[in-house]
Structure formats: C-alpha cells, structure tokens
Image: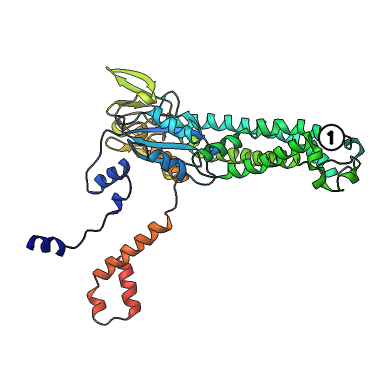
Amino acid sequence: MSAARTSTSQPRARPSNTTRGATKVGDLAAQVRDVGYGTSGSAHAQFIVDDSSRHFGSAGTLEGRIERLPGVLAASFNLATSAVHIEYLPGSIDLAAIRAAIQELGYNVHDADGNTGDVSVEDSEQAYRDAEYRELRRKFWVAAVLSAPVLVIAMAHGSIPLLNFAGVEWLQLALTTPVVFYAGAQFYRGAWAAFRHRAADMNTLIAVGTGAAYLYSVAATIAPGFFAAAAGSDMAAMGHGATAPVYFEAASVIIALILLGRMLEARAKGRTGEAIRRLAGLQAKTARVVRDGVDVDVPIEEVLAGDIVLVRPGEKVPVDGIVEEGTSTIDESMLTGESLPVDKSAGDEVFGATINKTGSFRFRATKVGKDTALQQIVKMVADAQGSKAPSRGSRTSSAGSSHRSSSRSPSPRSSRGSSPLQSTCGSRWRS
C-alpha cells in the first residue's frame, strides 16, 4: 500500500514533443552541436533542379521531403538559383536515393559541383539556365503562333467571313492540340506529381482549367448535337445551325501566357546569378608555384595550403597567403573599395584576386579553394539570395523567451521605484 501511495503521489510527466513523431537525423545533429560537440562524417552535395513542377513560391515541400530521408542532416532549396544543397551521412544514404526522392516530386535533376567535379557551380547553373530559357522560349513561340489564329477565330464571333465556315472547330482543334500536349506538357506533369503526393499547386490550377476547356471543346467538336440544346440560339445566329460553343482559345492562350511568364522568370533568374559569376571570374585561373625548386604554372585548383607562390608585376594574386619574400604594392579595391594601392612586405597578408602592381614577391598560401576571401564573398552572396525570413512562430517564441529572461532578472534600479517607462526601456536594453 505504501509503495502504491508513493507512486501515485509523484507528478505525471508530460509527454515531450519529440515523442509525437519521428525524430529527424538533422534534429539530433543540431542538438549535438547545441551542447558544444561537433559532428563528423557528413558529406555535402548540390543539385540543380528544373522547377517547372515546383510548388510556386515555396521551397518547404522539397526541403521537407528530402529532410525526411534517413541519413539526411539538412536540405536547403534556393529558389533564386534552383539549387538544392544537401548535407547527408554517406554510410546511411547515397546520392542515387536522394536524386530519386527529388524526382518523385516531378523535378528534373541536374548534377552540380561536388557531384561530378568537372565544372564549377556557377558554370553548371549558367548552362542549366541557358538551356531552360531556350526551351521555354521555343515552347512559348510555338504556343503563341498557334494560339493567335485560334484567338482571332473565337473573338470574331463569325464577323470575319474568311473564318466563318463549317468545320472551323476542327481547325481550332488542330491548332490547339500541339499547344496543350507539347507546350503545356510540363504543367500536366507537375499537376500529376502533386496529385500523387496529395498536394495542389499552381500547376494543378493550370492543368484543371486548361484541361477542362480542352476536353469539353473536343467533345463538343466531335459530338456537337449533344451540346447543341444547351447552346441555344446564339450559335445558330452565326449561320452554322445547331452547333455547340468551344473554348479552345482559353486552353491555348492561357498556356501561352503562363509560358511567357515562366520565360521572363527564367531570364531574370539568369541575370540574378551574374553577380556571383562576375565575382568568381575575378579569381586567377593559374598560379606559379615553386615545386622542387622549380617555378611551375599549375591550375588554381591544384594550389595547396603551404605552397610557395610567386607573383610578378601585373599578375593577380591567386590565393590568400602571407608574404615570405619581396615587396610590392597591391590593388585591393575589389575587396576594400580603396583606390590607392597597399604596400606589402614580408609578414603582410595578401588576398586572392587582388592585382600586384609593382614588384615581385613570394608568399606562402594559407587559404585555398573555397576558403579564400573571394570565395567566402561569393558564398555569402549566394546564401543571401536563398535566405528565408524567420517564421512568425520563431519570432514570437524568441520574443517570449526574451520577456521571460528579463522578468526573471529585474534590475536593482527598477526595484527602487523607477518609472514604468524607465523599467521597460531598461529591460529591453539589457535583453
């Protein structure tokens, strides 16, 4: 009896939020980092996706789908560049499984830097953007050329004798069919992918609207008598007797206009990445490295930390480092904006992509590849393009925690009778 009373007297523990659903690997890794430990063994991958079937204006669907995969630590989808950055555990999942998960949502996946190693990220994105823009432009012009006569026929309402003949609906059908099944195929594929995952997006709206107009018009063209009674005397006044109205122009023109918007969006995205490509283009392509006592020109990718690099007048500094021998003046305006060259001597730090003006010098490379100052600037610009504003819930919880912390530690000055305004300002300043 005493044991029973002891157990019942203890307060009942509330279930934690982590027991309500499966814990993600990324959440566990974040908790480990929060307590001060690091995580090792993870790898990074990047894909460029065709966002013709994405959920317009949101990256949450794709990110959530990838982060639910076992072995994936984090995923980030940059809508500005259509690049997906993934951190994963190689022993738990491979790139093929990640690619398959992305393709299940209806995306076309292209490899980027780090997966193949043949080209840089900027070159991969630029090549993909150019191909996407050319494809959208081709589809738009096909849709525009074929939709124009269909729109004229529909808007004329029989007032143009040349276009007012029996069987004109079959001409509209012939012109609209390529628009729907070629130019608009990507919208129907996107709608089907969203339907399979029990979701709805902009592609669903386009597919339902244009598909309904096209299917009805086909049925009215093949069996006009079935719909003639509902048409009334409006179509009979056009001189064709009992015919049913068709709406081929709605399907074709809507697809053409959506493709125009997508084409302009693709061009704008291509221009968005020009800043990154120009920054990356400032870096030198080769470096003169001392190997076994001989000066050798090597690609910038082969420079290692600790190498002795020789820079002559007029050349760009290939990587970051510390001057070992020689003196010179270097133009660092691309980093600092300062127009006057900076004197450099032994022990001074130099940065990649800056221009050597006068003398020659040798320096020891300290930061190479993506660790250089230039590459860090490029990374910050790319991250800024894909950054997301914090959600309202996170802002509310942050404000609530700040309020609780300030309430638990009131200042001595406020306890001595300061005004409410002074107390409030003081607590906000301290928090």
The one of 76 and 334 positioned closer to us in this rendering: 76
Horizontally, residue 79 falls left or right of residue 312, namely: right
The one of 206 and 320 positioned closer to us in this rendering: 206
Residue at coordinates 83% horizontally, 39% vertically from top-left?
153
Q: Find residue 360 and report its horizontal and vertical position in percent.
A: 36, 28
Give the amino acid type for the residue marked by disc 1 in the picture: Val
Q: Find residue 30 and report its horizontal and vertical position in percent.
A: 29, 45
Residue at coordinates 71% horizontally, 34% vertically from top-left?
143
Residue 111 position by quadrant: top left
Residue 162 position by quadrant: top right
Horizontally, residue 247 falls left or right of residue 13, namely: right
> SS of the residue at dot 1?
helix
Residue 227 position by quadrant: top right
Answer yes or no: is residue 357 visible: no
- The residue beneath circle 1 is 168
Answer yes or no: is residue 17 visible: yes
Q: Find residue 191 and report its horizontal and vertical position in percent.
A: 57, 39
Horizontally, residue 81 falls left or right of residue 85, namely: right
Q: Residues within 10 Å of mark 1 (few under 14, many from 20)?
A: some
Q: Find residue 330 and report its horizontal and vertical position in percent.
A: 39, 36
